[in-house]
Image (cartoon, helix red, strand yellow):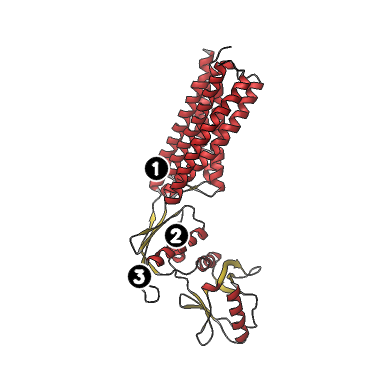
Amino acid sequence: MRSLGTLVLLIALVLGVAAYFTFSNPLLGMVKKGLDLQGGVHMALEAKDDPQAPVSEEAMNAAVGVIRKRVDLMGVAEPVIQRQGSRRIIVELAGVKDPEEAIRVLGKTAVLEFKDPQGNVVVTGKDLADAKEAISGPGGGYIVQLKFRPDGAKKFAEATARLVGQNIGIYLDGNMIQNPRVQEAIPSGEAQITNYESLDKAREVAIVLQSGALPVNLQVVENRTVSASLGADSVAKSSLAVVVGIAAVALFMLVLYRGPGLIADFALVVYLYLLMGALVALNASLTLPGIAGLVLSVGMAVDANVLIFERIKEELRVGKTLRSGIAAGFNRAFTTIFDSNTTTLVAAGVLFFYGTGPIRGFAVTLALGALIHLFTAITFTRFVLTQSVDSNIIRKASFGIRG
């Protein structure tokens, strides 16, 4: 009766830990969620014929690269950016609430030109090395700081020396945005675009300039906000799946191995916290496929412990002491665990490099799970198990071996 009561208490403890991890773990609130869990923006951009920028396969591939760079500079994790047909690009951004902001940043051609009073181009956006938003001094206005490459800096220095006392017009996509008067030659290769109404507006311009001009004329043909209501429902169901999955594998270890199983469950909790911490550190987005990868990686982590414990039992059956049996069991299981995780990492790598959006989220979670559970199963579990043996908490009987 006492052992049954202890088992029921341990089962309740495991269920409580699983529920806490899923619903109250502060790390979960820090992990970014994908489009399927929190909604965002869906855009379709279509290339239009232009004599100055003809549509071609190379131009479309280059446009995808420019858009991807702009999205990266916006700080959106795991976006979906893919070609659709010969002229259309689909963009999905999780967590972006303002579709108009996305249009301004992604759809702007971003052709930057500095022109003299006669309309001659002095330098262009191709001469830029960097563009950053900034605040001009204490209580100053919002600006975009420009830095030219060496060749561009030389051309800009020569132009400003020649045009002292005259104006240099700054044009973006053919529209003059400023026409400052040159006070003196500027040999530093740096310039400023001033008078933005907010730092966010300056950042938008800095992003499009830093990413380079689009090689084709893209127009927004579809733009909509993806509702998060489906995501909320999915989160609830996925949370339940995580609780059931973690609790099931934890109870399996507890019922099958008792004391050592409890140590494996403790290692599992550590594994889950390390995995969440890694997702936060990498700024990765958690998607529904990513949650599936998390549950799958939990099963893999427990599978490694099952393999280790069975190898230990085999060593104990041939008469080895508990400490030597644990050492031999871990050594025998290591090669198998390492090989299985290596194949998992290869599969995750293929999914990440050839997949898109949610598939890449699944790959990231699966790969991180494989790497982290190598540590928890081989190093952490072994350390705790050895300490438990030294403290006389774990005996041969704990593995079902008498004597």
Query: Separation of disc 1 and disc 3 at Cα?
Result: 39 Å
Tell which of 311 and 132 is nearer to you: 311
Q: Residue 220, image x and y in percent?
A: 37, 65
Give the labeled residue for mark 2: 98
First reached walking from the N terminus: tag 2 or tag 3:
3
Give the labeled residue for mark 1: 233
What secondary structure is found at the residue carrying circle 2? loop
The image quarter in which residue 371 lies = top right
At 45% across and 28% down in the image, what residue appears? Answer: 248
Give the labeled residue for mark 3: 48
At 64% across and 68% down in the image, what residue appears? Answer: 139
Dot 3 crowding, Cα within 10 Å, few <14, some 14–19, many 20+: some
Residue 29 seen in the current view: yes
Is 122 situated above or below 46?
A: below
Check disc 1 and give the amino acid type. Asp
Check disc 2 and give the amino acid type. Asp
Q: Are marks 1 and 3 in contact (CB under 8 Å)?
A: no
Is 357 situated above or below 73?
A: above
Tell me if 303 is positioned left or right of 82 in this view.
right
Check disc 3 and give the amino acid type. Lys
Tell me if 328 is positioned left or right of 241 in this view.
right
Q: Residue 43, image x and y in percent?
A: 39, 60
Query: Separation of disc 2 and disc 3 at Cα?
Result: 25 Å
